[in-house]
Amino acid sequence: MSSSTNALQDIGSVDDFLNGAATETVPLFDHLEFEFLLEYDVFAPDERGRTRVRQPPNLFRGFLHCYYEDVYGTRPVTRDLQNGLVWYYCELDKLPSRDTIDRFLTDLEHVIDDVFGRLVEQAASCGLLDSAYSIDTTHVEPIKYNDAASWNYDPTAEEYYYGFGCTIVSTGAKIPIAAELTQAKQAD
């Protein structure tokens, strides 16, 4: 008779699950409440009752997970959210499309300062923040017909991109505490 440890030893998805459960985002999701996103008008249903973006709290979990994994841009985020474990951890009930991700990030831009302010307050009250901070600059790639975006050059990657610049400040545990989206990266 085999023990459950031996029976599960050769199953790759068990390893994936156990490794995924050890990441920072999964315990973080247990400490923070994201339902307050539904209070913002940018995520409210339109006059006919149709929601602009499905599941803003869960999509935001996905955004935080992707940031932690150094995944940026609409297409890479969409690909990363196709992973079954990520899907489960972010509590998504349906795989979001690239357009949904783009709309969500576009809407989030209008309230991002307040959202991160509220999350920082929650994290501070839970004792999740430490005294080490880091700043990460990257870019967010929208769908091609987004008129607010522009073509820019990223000197660190030595490539052009169409989108927005993004600067994120995080604590030592890579918990984002502030973010700023601009039309372009501000680099020499």
Image (tube, rainbow, N blue to C red):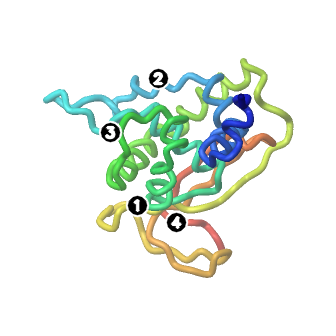
In this rendering, which labeled residue sits more in front, label 2 or label 4?
2
In the rendered image, which residue does mark 2 sit on? 35
- Side (left or right) of 85 relative to 149: right
Residue closest to the far bottom: 158
C-alpha separation, residue under disc 1 versus residue under disc 3? 15 Å
Q: Is residue 177 visible?
A: no
**Residue placed at 34% from the left, 30% from the top?**
41
Mark before the other along the chain sequence, 2 or 4? 2
Mark 2 residue type: Glu
10 Å crowding of disc 4: few (<14), some (14-19), many (20+) = many
Question: Which amino acid is tagged 1?
Answer: Pro
Q: Amino acid at mark 3?
A: Val
Task: First in sequence, mark 3 or 2: give its number.
Answer: 2
Return the residue at label 3.
Answer: 53
Which of the 4 quarters of the picture holds residue 124?
top right
> Which image quadrant for residue 16?
top right
Residue 8 as seen in the image, left or right of residue 56:
right
Which quadrant of the figure contains the N terminus? top right
User: Where does the image place residue 91, in percent across and percent down from the top left?
Assistant: 47, 32
Q: What is the number of the mark on residue 184?
A: 4
Read off the residue under disc 1.
142
Q: Looking at the picture, how far across and down is residue 188, in whole percent?
A: 66, 76
Residue name at image x 80 percent, y 44 percent = 133
State how far apart marks 3 and 2 are (Cα): 14 Å
Q: Quadrant of residue 95?
A: top left
Query: In the rendered view, would you say 109 is above or below 35?
Result: below
- SS under mark 2: helix
